[in-house]
Image (tube, helix red, strand yellow):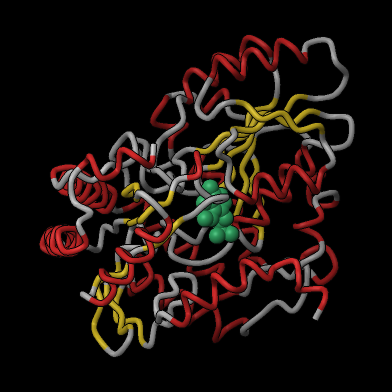
Amino acid sequence: MAVLDKYAALAQQYAGLEAAGANPFNVPFERVLSPTAAIIGGRETLLLGTNNYLGLTYDPAVIAAANAATQAAGTGTTGSRIANGSYGSHQQLEAALADFYGRKQGMVFSTGYQANLGIISALAGKGDHLLLDADSHASIYDGSRLGYAQVTRFRHNSPDDLANRLRRLAGEPGEKVIIVEGIYSMLGDTAPLAEFAAVKREYGGCLVVDEAHSLGVLGATGRGLAEQAGVEADVDFIVGTFSKSLGGVGGFAVTDMPGAEILRVVSRPYMFTASLPPGVIAATEAALHQLRARPELRQRLNENALRLYRGLAGLGFELGPEPSPVVSAIMPSPEAAFGFWAALLKAGLYTNVSLPPATPKGLALLRSSVSAAHSPEQIDQAIGLFAQVGERLGLLGAPAFAAAK
Ligand code: PMP
């Protein structure tokens, strides 16, 4: 049909992956066994591509909270908070998030994607300026479209480039909203947040940090990069998700900004969608409690991350610039990434393929993410499978990857 003709070339590539039985974008998990194992293609597979950073998806207290809330309040809210009411548990979770971050206000969205859409579009509207890192997540780019602000992209992780751009915008009407991420989801690198905060202090503007991949991972109490960098006071809004360290689904924003309550009636992705079901809200609050009460999860996660990063670097893979729970091996081509991914899966290891436009610099990535629930032996097993498959495919050793840079 004509409306789909524009996707013909892509559809052909996609069909090719399906035909080869190696489509990394549509993998059926026949049965999930634990945060680190599932049955895929009839065999037990080690999961190394789930974003389940703290491994809380099977936590007994989290599951019990979800079950109890579902029994008590039903499966869904069947509507948006502004039209159909807020349950006490929504407000309680918002208060718990605000308390965790030491902020006055918390706001819960139905996904992390919508939290970015809702906050960015509401803060940076028509006539305002949105300054975003060139490697921003799709939800940040999409939020910029929804708000109609003038968008300025600055070089990835470059406070100097941000400063230049703010200098050029000085004197122009409109608010300046700056957004960066804690840990970037493709290569696992962190933002130089102290430097960004200094730029904000010098030139002004509203600073938003998306801590989707850094909540529960970084900071003395797991609040994220702003906590680790000691610049929480410079950050006006923290945005995040429940779908990674908290093991559920949903998103949030916290702030001290006076008057932020108005966002509930101007933020369209908050207003025009159903609120999260009671079970999800209760599970998230229980997971947040676990995150706060068990710092050893964060420690184990970061030990596993370092183990995988060192192991793959030792094999000669070219990785992101620093160890983090996201460990991506740069592949020489998308075809190499597909081949490597499929061979790993066949050998019992599930990872992710990430390709442009989601990736920076047009890179093809074989992306892994580590969990606190992995044992050191599982991490070593994964490294062993990378070694085996890499050798078999002739993809071991740094020189093979030089071409991709
Ligand atoms: N921000 C970033 C940086 C992300 O990586 C993601 C998801 N990968 C999101 C926001 C969206 O979160 P969610 O999947 O919970 O919608």
Q: Is residue 8 above or below residue 402?
A: below
Q: Residue at x 78, y 11 (%)?
A: 170
Q: Residue at x 53, y 51 (%)?
A: 356
Closer to us: 231 or 404: 404
Image x and y of residue 389, in percent: 19, 64
Q: Is residue 252 above or below residue 249?
A: above
Q: Residue at x 65, y 43 (%)?
A: 105
Q: Is residue 151 left or right of residue 332?
A: right
Closer to us: 373 or 22: 22
Image x and y of residue 404, in percent: 38, 42
Image x and y of residue 232, in percent: 51, 28
Q: Quadrant of the C terminus?
A: top left
Q: Is residue 225 above or below residue 119?
A: above
Locate residue 281: give its quadrant.
bottom right
Locate residue 72: give its quadrant.
bottom right
Q: Quadrant of the N terminus?
A: bottom right
Q: Residue at x 61, y 42 (%)?
A: 254
User: Taking the image as drawn, is residue 93 in sight?
Assistant: no
Ligand 1 is located in which of the four quadrants? bottom right
Q: Is residue 184 left or right of residue 95?
A: left
